[in-house]
Amino acid sequence: MLIPIVALIFLTTFCLVIIVFLAVTGVKDSPKSELKRRLRQMARQGHQEMPVELRSEILREMAPADRFLSRLPLLHGLDRKLDHAGLQLTISSFVTICAGLTLAGAALAALLARSIWFAPLGAALALLLCFGYLETKARQRAERFTELFPEALTMISRSLRAGHSFNTAVQLVGSEIANPVGELFKTAYDQQLLGLRITDGLNNLNERMESLDLRFFTTVIGINSEIGGNLSEILDKLSETIMERLRIRKQVRVYTAQGRMSGYVLGALPIVAYIAFNILNPGYESALTKEPLGIYILIGAVFMQLLGLLVIRSIIKIKI
């Protein structure tokens, strides 16, 4: 009787996740939705350029669910993390998707293991995958930005040498360089057209992208606007420094490839072995799923496995 109920719960939550996903993807590319999201983020961060009355009005127009979730300590800064990852989702949409996947993971784990004791483990893994996906998207977007940023700096330097203004160079980067560099510089240029200083528009990009190189660039632009200097030469030096650091980072990834592969093999080997034993001899490991002590051993093994993967990751992760 337990298996049909778990299967029904799994199918229900799966359909719910699909419905929410289709609804979100239908509006995420809307310019109106993007404008509202950016205004809400600016209002919550308390920008000095935004009047207090306008900030209060924007916050009042937020959905009650978003307003409530944004106040929770555990979800503080989640909207900023979604922006860093390039996901055009509201807090409530992301939390709803995570909740649906968590329920689906719990039902699927209980269904596959034929034991309700595995439901919390499946829910924890599903929740970990949701936030792991968010972190991965943010990291990949930041790495992509770092790879394209030297090309943007070189383009600005060449435009300045050709006699173009700095604003025109920023516009050129926004239209010619691929995302995420292009969309961020295009945003800065659009803000300049609406009356914001180009230096302030570029400084605002630091809130949308976690990049030390971008902070160096905005600092250079701010200092140059105050005291002057050969901006094209400075940008060339900054571009060379970033490319040299990228080269060293790629070398480090080559040197640590064996450690990463060892972590992948050690992480996948117990799972593959467990599945293989269940296929070859279905009753061989039944004690681990039918006895309480066996369930505790499996849960402990999973946590020890995750701890080992974190230790390996900390060893091979070298900051440059």
Image: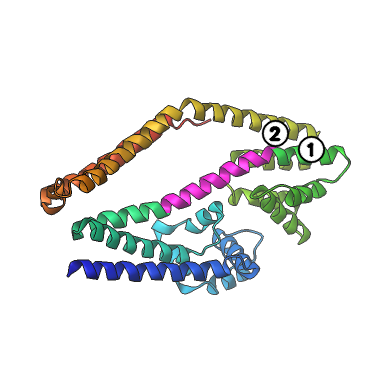
Image coordinates of residue 173 in percent, x first then y, are: 75, 47
Question: Tell me, what colour scheme is on the image?
Answer: rainbow
Residue 261: which quarter of the image?
top left
Residue at image position (29%, 55%) is: 122
Tell me whether the residue at label 1 lies in contact with that at label 2, contact meaning CB atoms closer than 8 angstroms: yes
Image coordinates of residue 269 in percent, x first then y, are: 30, 38
Q: Helix or strand or loop: what does disc 1 sit on? A: helix
The quadrant of the picture occupied by the N terminus is bottom left
Image coordinates of residue 40 in percent, x first then y, are: 57, 65
Q: Helix or strand or loop: what does disc 2 sit on? A: helix
Q: Is residue 275 left or right of residue 138?
A: left
Q: Amino acid at mark 1?
A: Ser
Q: Is residue 132 magenta?
A: yes
Q: Which residue is mark 2?
A: 239
Q: Which residue is mark 1?
A: 157
Residue 221: which quarter of the image?
top right
Residue at image position (60%, 62%) is: 38
As drawn, the residue found furthest toward the front would be 280
